[in-house]
Image (tube, rainbow, N blue to C red):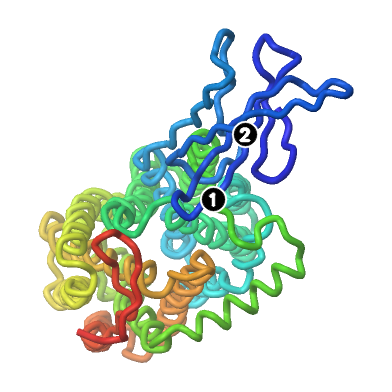
């Protein structure tokens, strides 16, 4: 097979070396994806014969490889060769978002538990691990530079193999005297690779499926992202506790094993996606030079801020999970700290079971319910309800810090309530960015910018959480009282959230005047 020009592929006809099949990808007003297939003998000198073209409409995206099957002997040369069927979303959406959630939480949350076990102070943990959110904040700066080069699929797989290498390097840093700085450096590399993967993975999701199908898969998408988070903060953390308590390994040995296991998982995701991940639709600047990419960068920023009500929408995105940002950073530390320090005194095993068992079941239920509500009621009608469901359960940590229960089952049940609300509410957050901010000629880049604003929330709340904790005298009850105060603005903003774009019954985005609830 050889490529004669962009989206034009030539295939040898099996058993007929003197012939060829030419497949061209085209777009017409009446169909998005048309493959033009023709058969002709290999031109001999002086041969003026023309080939007859046949067209076949296919449901897949732009071919990025041998999109058409090679003809078998005896096939009628005048019949179009069918394109390979598109992979069902269930073969790649769960694994794609699982691979997004795992490294994100390893960098942002599990690293904090690792450093806690290795003796780093709460204030240093909060400050330095929060800075590792910066790759997600800054990713809009380089997201347009990805569009002209390679496919989204290529970027996803490459970043997954890079994370395999960087997480393995974290493991081998831990026995060193200067483990803190060295491991932070490789966590930073993991963060940049994970943020880049997020850009292109969301691009694959948004350009492969129409808006109505996106809403149908929103619950599964959010569930799998957070399932990756639960694997990281639940199962892997629980594993370190078991290794430490049962096999009497040192914390360094426990975390080395877990980091190597996480590296192996990322390598496994890369191998799986080599087989099943679709390429996503190419960007308008795909295949062009760096100058075009820089022009694309300027255009993407300019067009973002030309959207109606954009500043209000970005404010909604920033504050939606504002209170959650404090709980993400200090919730696990509160559960691990001894009771003499105001914590609940859990070990890694108990923490992992609560997050990995009770938290998983609750989050799955919440994510599916949130996706169901958004699909049935539409995002516009359900957005306030979803915002309340995410922020109201912050009362759980305020309760735990005052009641100080000792029953692990009761602690797990209370944490599960918070996880249920988080799963339900996060669906609204993701859909709002996808359906209100992302649509347009720079969909992938604008969504990356929106998620960058979301990451800025984590960075800001995490950076100041250590100072807030010190400011209230390292008193968890007072700290979580302030979290309740910070959970009020998201609900107010959700009430006034603008919806300049609505999704019609045909699944297409339609512009409407900006309005709130």
Q: Residue at x 57, y 37 (%)?
A: 36
Quadrant of the frame with the C terminus: bottom left
Q: Using residue 221 as the reference point, say whether residue 208 is left or right of it.
A: right
Q: Nearer the viewer, residue 494 or 389?
A: 494
Q: Which residue is mark 1?
A: 27
Quadrant location of residue 139? bottom right
The tag on residue 23 is: 2
How packed is label 1: few (under 14 Cα within 10 Å), some, or many (20 or more)?
few
Q: Residue at x 38, y 71 (%)?
A: 433
Residue 25 position by quadrant: top right
Q: Is residue 301 above or below residue 193?
A: below
Q: Where is residue 96 drawn, in percent x and y?
A: 44, 47
Q: Secondary structure at mark 1?
A: strand
Q: Nearer the viewer, residue 260 or 419?
A: 419
Q: How many marks?
A: 2
Residue 267 point in image, percent of width and height: 55, 40
Q: Is residue 207 something that shows in the picture?
A: yes
What SS does tag 2 mark?
A: strand
Q: Please state the horizontal and vertical placement of residue 459, each as a whole percent of the image.
A: 47, 77
Query: 256 and 96: which one is in front?
Result: 96
């Amino acid at each position: 097979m050889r490529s004669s020009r962009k989206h034009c592929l030539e295939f040898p006809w099996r058993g007929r070396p003197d012939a060829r099949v030419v497949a061209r990808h085209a777009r017409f007003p009446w169909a998005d994806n048309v493959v033009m297939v023709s058969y002709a003998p290999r031109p001999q000198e002086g041969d003026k014969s023309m080939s007859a073209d046949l067209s076949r409409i296919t449901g897949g995206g732009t071919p990025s490889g041998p999109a058409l099957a090679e003809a078998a002997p005896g096939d009628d040369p005048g019949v179009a060769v069918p394109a390979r069927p598109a992979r069902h979303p269930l073969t790649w959406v769960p694994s794609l978002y699982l691979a997004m959630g795992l490294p994100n939480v390893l960098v942002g949350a599990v690293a904090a538990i690792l450093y806690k076990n290795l003796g780093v102070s709460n204030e240093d943990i909060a400050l330095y691990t929060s800075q590792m959110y910066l790759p997600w904040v800054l990713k809009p700066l380089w997201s347009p530079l990805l569009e002209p080069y390679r496919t989204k699929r290529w970027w996803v797989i490459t970043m997954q193999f890079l994370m395999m290498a960087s997480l393995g390097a974290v493991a081998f840093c831990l026995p060193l005297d200067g483990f803190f700085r060295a491991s932070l450096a490789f966590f930073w590399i993991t963060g940049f690779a994970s943020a880049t993967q997020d850009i292109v993975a969301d691009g694959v999701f948004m350009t492969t499926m129409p808006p109505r199908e996106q809403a149908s898969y929103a619950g599964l998408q959010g569930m799998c992202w957070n399932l990756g988070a639960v694997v990281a903060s639940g199962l892997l953390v629980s594993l370190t506790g078991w290794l430490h308590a049962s096999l009497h390994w040192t914390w360094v040995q426990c975390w080395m094993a877990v980091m190597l296991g996480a590296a192996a998982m990322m390598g496994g995701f890369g191998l799986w996606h080599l087989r099943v991940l679709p390429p996503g639709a190419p960007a308008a600047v795909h295949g062009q030079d760096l100058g075009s990419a820089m022009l694309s960068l300027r255009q993407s920023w300019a067009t973002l801020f030309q959207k109606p009500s954009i500043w209000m929408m970005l404010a909604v995105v920033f504050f939606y999970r504002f209170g959650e940002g404090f709980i993400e950073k200090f919730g696990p530390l509160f559960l691990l700290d001894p009771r003499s320090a105001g914590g609940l005194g859990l070990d890694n095993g108990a923490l992992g079971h609560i997050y990995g068992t009770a938290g998983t079941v609750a989050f799955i239920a919440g994510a599916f319910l949130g996706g169901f509500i958004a699909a049935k009621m539409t995002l516009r009608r359900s957005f306030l309800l979803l915002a309340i469901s995410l922020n109201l359960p912050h009362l759980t940590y305020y309760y735990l810090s005052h009641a100080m229960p000792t029953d692990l089952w009761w602690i797990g049940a209370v944490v599960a309530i918070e996880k249920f609300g988080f799963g339900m509410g996060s669906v609204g957050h993701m859909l709002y960015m996808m359906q209100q901010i992302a649509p347009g000629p720079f969909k992938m880049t604008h969504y990356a910018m929106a998620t960058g604003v979301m990451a800025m929330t984590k960075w800001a709340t995490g950076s100041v959480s250590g100072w807030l904790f010190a400011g209230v005298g390292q008193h968890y009850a007072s700290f979580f009282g302030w979290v309740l105060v910070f959970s009020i603005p998201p609900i107010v903003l959700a009430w006034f959230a603008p919806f300049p774009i609505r999704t019609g019954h045909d699944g297409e985005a339609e512009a409407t005047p900006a309005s709130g609830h």
